[in-house]
Image: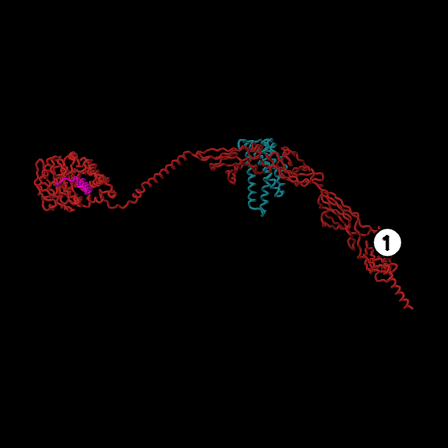
Amino acid sequence: MKQKLRSSVQIILLFALTAVDLTGQSYPGKPKIIRCRSLEKETFSCWWKPGSDGGLPTNYTLFYSKDSEEKIYECPDYGMSGPNSCYFDKNHTNPWTTYNITVMATNEIGSNSSDPQYVDVTSIVQPDAPVNLSVETKTSASTMYLWAKWSPPPLADVTSNSHVYHYELRLKPEEKEEWEETVSVGVQTQYKVNRLQAGVKYVVQVRCMLDIGEWSEWSSERHIHIPNGESPPEKPTIIKCRSPEKETFTCWWKPGSDRGHPTNYTLLYSKEGEERVYECPDYKTAGPNSCYFNKKHTSFWTIYNITVKATNEIGSNVSDPLYVDVTYIVQTDPPINVTLELKKTVNRKPYLVLTWSPPPLADVRSGWLTLDYELRLKPEEAEEWETIFVGQQTHYKMFSLNPGKKYIVQIHCKPDHHGSWSEWSLEKYIQIPTDFRIKDMVVWIIVGVLSSLICLVMSWTMVLKGYRMIAFILPPVPGPKIKGIDTHLLETGKSEELLSALGCHGFPPTSDCEELLIEYLEVEDSEDQQLMPSHDNGHPSKNAKMIAKETDSDSGRGSCDSPSLLSEKCRESRAILSTLRTQDIRDVQENNGGRHWETQCIASEQKILLFNNESTKSSTWPAAQLPDNQPPMFAYHSTVDAHKITLCTINVNIAPVLAEKEEKHQPQYPITETVHDNMEKQREMENLYSKTDQTTVQVTQNRPNDKSPFLMPKLMDYVEVHKVRQDKEPAVLLKQKENSGKTEKYTVPGTSKEYTKVSTIVDHNILVLMPDSRIQHISVSQEPAMEMSQNLQQGQAEKNMSYCLTVPSECKRETSASEYMDPSSFIPAFK
Amino acid sequence: CHTSGMLTPNGKEYAQKIPREELTHLILKLLQAWKEPLSHFNQHIEHHQELPDDSLSKAKQISNMVHELKTGVEKVTEKARFSINSLNGMASSEAAGLSISNEANMMSDSDFIHCFRRDSNKVQSYLKILKCRIMPENSC
């Protein structure tokens, strides 16, 4: 039966279940206990959360049991803590027991119970947050602080006041995320917060805790705004105190920030030894933020205690005190009336005199204030100052200044022993004049000019005569030089020059040449004292005349008397020849021959037998013929006037040239034919001697047939001295010579004593005979003087002897071929 | 300072007003007042090992100078033939100076130096004023 009952119940339950399912109604869901909490350790509450209600009204019941007891109690108070809660009051709360709490949900269909929850009262204690939090700002001692006040959490049982809560406060600026401060307040319900920033909005919260359990929740926030500028001014500072003249003084201070509020400053001071505090007598005289103490309020040798106080609406602030003894704070103004003056010493050097005056306020006159001075100066462009301590005087002399520079000068002063240096005076400029003496400059200018002149002269001489200078310094090695011959002249080959050299120089010949025998003279009788032209060409009478004019005495002078002369003549002849030559070219065609000769030779005052230029064709001139390349050794058979000899020489020189030139032409003016007539000669000789001054000697020259007119081997002819006349007119008579051919009669001289060459004629009277010498020999053997003396005739013989003695040697020497230049040698040049 | 009790002119005007004799007297009084304390001070610091030798020699030098200065001023006084009253004043000041100087021995070193500096400055200023009053031509 029971089985049937049971099964029927099960069937009914199933039906119920299914019935629920079918209709949507079922038994309630399982509730859940959310939390249990105790506020004060004496009561607690639990809250649950219901499950699904199954569609039907559900009833919830809470059952609990204590510790391990079996007895199940039901919640004493359901509504106290709100819906779905259970409140356990004091009587039902035991902190030392553990409660096992379940909640059952019941509806028409069925019920459901939650899981059991074990609750230990002590572990679930958590008070409520404090309440009535109030925050306000307060100021004390010129600072702003925050004052927070609150109340503990309220309790249901007002009686239980014994609870001691611990509180905690936190605050932060509103904008910030993190809490700036969390303060453990303690058991008090108020708190003061310092160090707040002005103008910031703060947020404040508190929470509390019992001795056991957890902290409560934070209370609601309180916001508080810290006011901006609502603070006293910042502390001012005193800068300095100064006395400008040791009778008054001034103090300056620097204010702090006034925090936006008008601030008032007051200076308070007290003196040493006194208690009384005074306020500054004068705020204005010295400017803003200053205090001026006039004479009455200034005491010396006492220490002042000075402070500055800043006051504003909120509060005030006082600076640090400054202790001042006026005697030590003196700083004057800079010196005035700084004057700079330039003076000159005895040596005309400039020096600077500085003078100045003490600053106007300083009482130096009574000695109350004594000042030391210091000056500094520098050249305008320099970097560093030079500082000089001057002492108590008000003037200074500066000597070591650079002329031409501009200097800057400054002065400052300080009371002796105590005090500070004043500011530097204003800059003063001074220009040192350049030491420019005119005397010095003039000296330098003169020196410069002179040296430049000298340099110029030196360079000019170097340029122009450098060679000579060098030659002076390093004389050149002399080369061989032939006397009387200018090689250059010869080389250049200018006939004019040569002829001029021949013709003009040394004409008339020098005296010592007279005694030298050079050539052979063939004397012809010429009473008319005219040269007889021998050739057919008509000699213009002019010629003769000319000749007559020109010849006064011995005309047939041997031309080869002195080698030097000869050389001169050679030169001259060269010149003449050269001139001739140049003109010959022209004249040859014209057959104008003899122009040139006379140009130079006419110049001779010795009546040179010359040919005028007019004589075109023929002009004869006494010419001594010179054998080609032979020394001019001619025997003079007749007296030859010394003067004429040169002529002959010249003519000789000329003649060959001319002759050579006119080779082609017939010699139109051959040299006068030799008259080989002894008689004639003799006569001539006699004539010569009779008319010493008018004898003309015609030197003739046998014209050779061959082309080399210069080979005149026949010239040599010797005249035998017949006798010597020693009466009034000493004369030498020459023997007649055989009328011999020219060539044949080459009697070698020296074979006979009787034949001697006439060396020279002296004084028209003396025939100086040469010692024997060969015609063709170049060298002349030196005859002893004895022979010479034999030949001498006159009383002057001795003299002549001596003369001749000397001369022949010379002559000999000079007639050496080496010294004598044969004009024939020039011929090639002229060709 | 032990000399604070002395009535000395505190400014230029006061110093110029009082007669020369009185000024001279004052100077002498001051110098006298420091004579003893200086010697005492010298003895005192000789035992101070930490002070450099320069300071010791300087201190001795200073006390000598003060002594010489006093002698000099006395000579000036004689030459200027100041009234006899001042001399009497001197005698009394001697006594006063002694009592004062006993006080001075109690001072600390820094105070001592401070006081001495001040008083020497006083003396210098008074002497300069005196100089320019007696002989105005020299840089006054």
Residue A688 percent coordinates (x, y): 11, 37
- Position of the N terminus of chain A, as image quadrant, is bottom right
Which quadrant of the figure has residue A607?
top left
Looking at the rendering, in which quadrant would you find the C terminus of chain A?
top left
User: Where residue A562 sits: x, y (%)?
Assistant: 17, 41
Crowd rating for badge 1 (residues with CA inside 10 Å; few <14, some 14–19, many 20+): few
Front residue of A534/B139: it is A534
Q: Chain of mark 1?
A: A
Image hue for chain A: red
Residue at the right extreme?
A1
Q: Is residue A360 magenta?
A: no
Q: Quick check: is A668 in the magenta stretch?
A: yes
Residue A765 can be seen, yes or no: yes
Q: Position of residue A139 (x, y in %)?
A: 73, 43
How many numbered callouts? Answer: 1
**Three-letter amino acid code at the position of disc 1:** Gly
What SS does tag 1 mark? loop
Q: Nearer the viewer, residue B100 or A592?
A: A592
- Report the coloring of the rendering: by chain
In this rendering, is residue A431 above or below A476?
above
Q: Which of these two is toward me, A479 or A442? A: A479
The residue wearing badge 1 is A79
| Residue in front for this viewpoint, A800 or A211 | A800
Magenta residue span = A648-674
Indicate left or right for A58 with A196 as reference. right
Per the rendering, the colour in which chain B appears is cyan
- Indicate the quadrant where residue A622 lies: top left
In percent of width and height, residue A775 lies at 14, 45
Residue at point 61%, 32% (across, down)? B14
B118 left or right, relative to A514: right
Res. A506 in view: no
